Image (cartoon, rainbow, N blue to C red):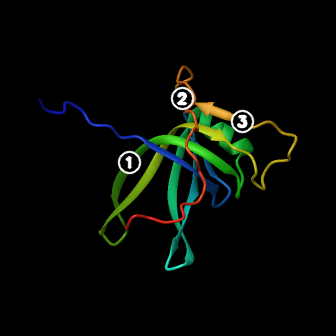
Amino acid sequence: MGLSRGVNKVILIGNVGKDPEVKHLDNGMVITKFSLATSETYTKNNEKVTNTEWHNIVLFKGQAEVAEKYVKKGDALYIEGKIQTRSWDDQDGNKRYMTEIVGNNMQMLGGGSGRKNDQPAQQASQESAQPQAQQSESLGEEDDLPF
């Protein structure tokens, strides 16, 4: 039995690398882009090693509006979405590629520098009937990796 369709789902928890860039299109659509850093720390040869990966996040419509109003550099976010790679030709005719995470669910986790402590966390989802992901997994450091 063959696989009839694939799965393209990404879940990230990280910190915003810079204030979002927002575009308001003529048709009323809002697009927000920002970078998100995820870090993992482990011990190698009795030394603590931290690897940081940077992700390009793109949000549309309602989520983009929430991000425009509330998301700032340093904020902690939970993002669900899909990986999308787009290509274009630059001014010299070279093919260029960009891999982005197109978000369809965003949860502000607090603890960032962009909001005051008394403001509630904001949530946006393009699929409002979608249940919230349960965060039962530990997000702590791993002492040793098996490789």
Q: Secondary structure at mark 3?
A: loop
Q: Is residue 130 left or right of 82 when viewed as pictured?
A: right
Name above or below for residue 141 compared with residue 51.
above
- Residue closest to the far right: 118
Residue at 56%, 62% in the rendered image? 39
Quickly name the residue at label 3. Answer: 122
- At x 44% / y 52%, what residue is drawn? 100
Residue type pointed to by label 2 = Gln
Q: Which residue is mark 2?
A: 126
Q: Is residue 69 visible?
A: yes
Q: Is residue 70 left or right of residue 87?
A: right
Residue 29: x and y in percent read 56, 35
Q: CA distance from mark 1 to mark 3?
A: 25 Å
Number of the front mark, 1 or 3: 3
Residue at 57% across / 23% down in the picture? 128
How far across and down, in percent of the image, does residue 108 sit?
68, 42
